Image (tube, helix red, strand yellow):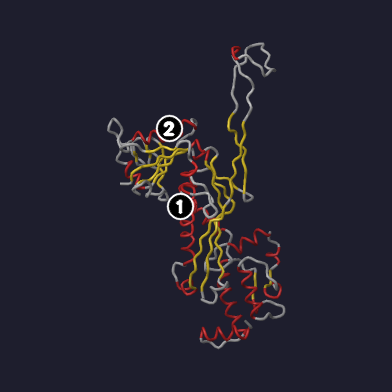
Amino acid sequence: MTDHELIHLLEKTTGLALNEESVKSLIDDRLSGLLTAAPRRLVLGSEAPGPALGLSRFLGEVRRLGMGQPGRHAEDLVRVEPSFKQMLPHQAKDLREGLASAGGYLAPAESAGEVLNLLGNFSAIKSLCREVPMRSHQITFPTLAGGLSAYWVPEASDTSSSDYDPADGFTPRGDATFGQMAITAQVLAVKVVVSNQLLDDSDPKVDQVLGQIFAETLAAAFDRACLTGAGSATDPISGLLTRITSNALNVTGDFGFDHLADLIFKVYENAPHAQEVPVVGHAKAEKLLMKLKDDQGDYIYRQPGQPRAEGDTRPRVWGEPFVRDPNLPTNLGAGGNQTALVAGDFATSAFVGLRQGLVVKTNPWAEPYFSYNQTCFLAEARLGFALSDEKRFAKLSGVPTA
């Protein structure tokens, strides 16, 4: 499409009398508004020195800059202040990937960190696990699976030989069994398209509201993956309900407090030094737990502040923290009326890899959104999840939901 055809199309759409310079001016005015939240280090469009660009090239350059890509005619379109040229590459990149207060593609880098904190606030699983910063898409940890044992050495005994007599009170040297635990960062994203009129007229600003919505949506998706993920191409994280095989328990008969005790102590059998064993469950399971009593007639569920739960910020069952997570399924079992409970040594045996915090990108100049006077928001986070030893976790299936 030529410049003349593009201007003619815009005239038909807007009902305005336009030419190349007036269209550039309109675009420059909108960009100036979008840049108010960022340091004024850029001068765009007709204000910039150098030869004038055709409208098609001008729009192409704006689109590339909005997507964080280098321009083909940047020197003709953008004048960069010396202080901006002296910024490190990752600092300049942050300015293009942040969330601008008016829906633009440039913003202070602090925006991404604020939304990342929100992501942690809304994720129940992430708050339980050990967080590991990642510098690449995958990080690998060596693990010790076993093979070592300690022995007593009698006084003045020769321990250099591997052929020891067990009757002497010590055993041969053990061979350590090593393994590997890999955390792979996966891209989790959410996309929203908003009309520019809504962006301009809304109070509070739509893009500010979207920041929290993005955090809630991505946190829920991450929790779902950590709990029920299939480990497939489109669902790349293997969730706890899939990974836990050694300690897979089922409710037999009527659900009672003994089932919960079995769940918790299956974990302690393999993680005897765990400081606590959080129990993760749906609100429908929590309602059932609140009604359970032990043999002395005492409720096993304690709200924060109740006896045996003073100073706690979370409720407790059998003395262990209970974590409510709506992302556990409630339609399990033949009748579709069952859920599951998960317990584990999350603090030392579950890992969340953080490759990239939540970043919100916007581009009002990309097609087809530009033609429809819309702005596209794309929020992304790169996270991974792994267990060092699935035997340190247990699941209880067959928990009734009613």
**Which quadrant of the rendered structure holds the N terminus?**
bottom right
Left or right of 108 on screen, residue 251: left
Asked if residue 284 lies left or right of residue 246, the reply is left
Count every numbered label the image shows and give the total: 2
Left-right relation of 43 to 319: right
Outermost residue toward the left?
297
Q: Quadrant of residue 259?
A: top left
Q: Secondary structure at mark 2?
A: helix
> What type is the residue that disc 1 sits on?
Phe
Relative image position of residue 393 (x, y in whole percent)? 47, 38
State how far apart marks 1 and 2 are (Cα).
28 Å
- The residue at 60%/44% (across/down) is 182
Q: Quadrant of residue 313?
A: top left
Q: Quadrant of residue 303?
A: top left
Q: Could you classify mark 2 by the number of other residues whose Cα lies within 10 Å: few (under 14), some (14-19), or many (20 or more)?
A: some
199 vs 281, nearest the viewer = 281
Q: Nearer the viewer, residue 176 or 156?
A: 176
Q: Residue at x 49, y 65 (%)?
A: 192
Residue of label 1: 122
Question: Which one is closest to the eye, mark 1 or mark 2?
Answer: 2
**Badge 1 density bin: few <14, some 14–19, many ≥20, Cα 10 Å:** some
Residue depicted at x 51% and y 84%: 14
Across and down, in percent, residue 348 comes to 53, 38
* Amino acid at dot 2: Phe
Residue closest to the eye, 221 or 124: 221
- The residue under label 2 is 265
Q: Image height check: is 162 above or below 374?
A: above
Taking 301 as reference, is 121 above or below it?
below
Residue 103 in the image, given as x and y percentages of width and height? 53, 68
* Front residue (pair 124, 118): 124
Circle 1 SS class? helix
Give percent across and percent down for residue 51.
72, 80
